[in-house]
Image (tube, rainbow, N blue to C red):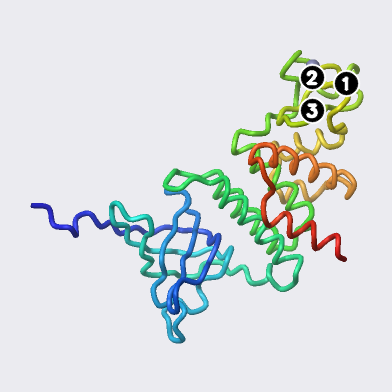
Amino acid sequence: MVASDSLVRLETSEALILDVVNLHERDRIVTFLTREAGKKKGVAQGSRARHSRFAGQLQPLAKVAITWFEKEGRELARISSVELIRPAGKLQEDLEGILLGSYLADHLLEFAQENEPSEAFYRLLDSTLAALLDGVDRDLAARYFEAWILRLAGIFPAPRECPVCGRPFGGELAAHGAILPPNADALLCAECGGSAGLQVSGEVLAFLRQIGRQALPAVRESPPSARVLRQVEDLCARVRRYFLQRELRSYDVIRQTRASL
Ligand SMILES: [Zn+2]
């Protein structure tokens, strides 16, 4: 006979906290991202109590060392301890920072898979948060992050050549950069793309190629203009919407907030 205890596994990992929601009067459900085990969800029992051992540790986007128990067949893990490695409170001191934080986390909640290794997603979120805490321009960081997420999810092809005719972008015959046809997630050349799609400028393509070669701290040294960043945002939002078939909730909030300012 197998003791039921043998089906319980104890795990410890470095993690980034994605979401914290209240559960009943005393507990919280925490969603976190690990390198090896992807996205995880667990209950932090008693974490709403006044003298909880989790006090102050469960901050969205904080980097933590987390230990949890997993029982076979149970959807929720049980979190036994959380130690803060890098707080993210500095990001959440103003409304814009709070909205950006939930926008970053929202992407991982959507695109990272449960129980699947997610080294690349983890590194992207970790390095973006580190750069933001170091004072990198938020607009630049958000555009870098959203374009990379789509690439890592395998949705966004490298912006180098037209997948239909094979012509490289930026050549003489593609003076307008590229076209994103309506309801599509591929960039085509001006000839293959038709006239109904979104015109993607050569500067936007150059930025998308640049972030493929350079990490955020290097991109920071030669950032594109705010106008190009708006175009990148629009392009990524369309591709993401097409893939998800809806808008990210946090992006709706960002747009409504911008419109009301
Ligand atoms: Zn083409």
Whether label 1 touches label 2, CB < 8 Å: yes
Q: Nearest the camera: 94 or 234?
A: 234
- SS for callout 2: loop
Say which residue label 1 marks: 174
Q: For mark 1, does the 10 Å Cα neighbourhood hold few (<14), some (14 to 19), or many (20 or more) residues? A: some
**Residue at 68%, 64% in the rendered image:** 133
Whether label 1 touches label 3, CB < 8 Å: no
The CB of the residue at mark 1 lies under 8 Å from ligand 1: yes
Q: Residue 180: name its quadrant.
A: top right
Q: Nearest the camera: 209 or 95?
A: 95
Give the alpha-carbon distance from disc 2 to disc 3, as whole Å: 17 Å
Say which residue label 3 marks: 181
| Residue at the left extreme, as displayed | 1
Q: Residue 258: name its quadrant.
A: bottom right
124 displayed left or right of 207: left
Mark 1 or 2, nearer chain start: 2
Q: Residue 238: name its quadrant.
A: top right
